[in-house]
Image (tube, rainbow, N blue to C red):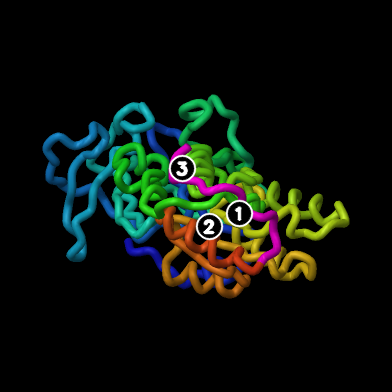
Amino acid sequence: MQMERQTEILLESGTNELEIMEFTIAGETFGINVAKVVEIMMVCPVKPMQKAQANIEGIFKSRDMVITVIDLGGYLNLPASTNPERDIFIITNFNNHNFAFHVHTVVGIARISWQQIKKPDQVIYGGKEGVSTGIADFENHLITILDFEKIVSEISPELGIQVEDINKLGPRQRSEKPILLAEDSMLLSRMITESLRRAGYENLAVTNNGQEAWNYLEEAKSQGDPIENHVCCIVSDIEMPQMDGHHLTKLIKNDPILRHIPVILFSSLINEEMRRKGEQVGADAQLSKPEIANLVGLIDRLSLNIPGRAPGADAGAED
């Protein structure tokens, strides 16, 4: 079944809501943002790939696309399906790549607020850098929202953020201009932070979601000094618990003190549809992960005319 993209939720901007597709593996309920889903289909034969990572089942062709199949249950160390012939492939697109995730059943679609999604305890699915970005409390049951970007980057590291790409920018100056980052994935937050520091941006405020970023901005405004002393550029993911990047951007651009601060949406969801939503809420730039070197270039350009602390000595790509 191909997903219908023209639903009400996907046409709105900045509502701080999303639609989650619920699915199960070994009786446990998980969720994926509908914005990532292209279609769902019954399992079909796949062609194994020699020397592939253990949780890659193989590839198959659909609508002239060759799609890699990931055994999500195997990745999560959950038991195999008791009815494998009735399993489901969830076909996704994010970071400009297509993947099929092999699951056991699809339950349906739930429309919820990001405020209903809480940050999971660190012991859930992998410890400090686990693969759960949030737990949704919906209609008396819990839905574990998985970090699909992290899963793919672990299985296919070449598709993730490449910190080494910063080296290609050549020698750079240290900058004390304050940058605010909002990113819920622990792994991606660490990689983005490391990349920006390699690029010379050392004055970083890192938050776990849009609500924390907004709280930081509210506190900065209350200090009474120029807001540029606290933030000269904001880099935000879109999918985040409590408050998403679109709603955060809308709040910023509707605030007379903050509206001139550039906002870059750095997300796996930057496609034509989501780009329109970002434009509607006033994002200054939108970039798909994992284009980390291009992100640095955007920060350089957008923060150029924002007052900030003077740069220091020359900095190479690596300390």
Q: Amino acid at mark 1?
A: Ile
Q: Amino acid at mark 3?
A: Asp
Would you identify the image quadrant in which residue 140 lies?
A: top right
Residue 180 visible? The answer is no
Would you identify the image quadrant in which residue 74 lies?
A: top left
**Of pointers 2 and 1, the one earlier in the residue sequence:** 2
State the extent of the magenta-drawn residues as a range. Answer: 306-319
- Position of residue 22 in the picture relative to residue 261 (left or right): left
Rendered residue at 49%/70% (across/down): 275
> Counting other residues with Cα less than 10 Å from the Cα at mark 1, is it few (<14), some (14-19), or many (20 or more)?
some
The residue wearing badge 2 is 19
Q: Residue 147 bears which disc, if any?
A: 3
Q: Do labels 2 and 1 touch, CB within 8 Å?
A: yes
Q: Which residue occupies the foreground of this view, 186 or 125?
A: 186
Q: Is residue 129 above or below residue 275?
A: above
Q: Which residue occupies the foreground of this view, 114 or 293?
A: 293
Q: Nearer the viewer, mark 3 or mark 1?
A: 3
Distance from disc 2 to disc 1, alpha carbons, whole Å, reads 6 Å
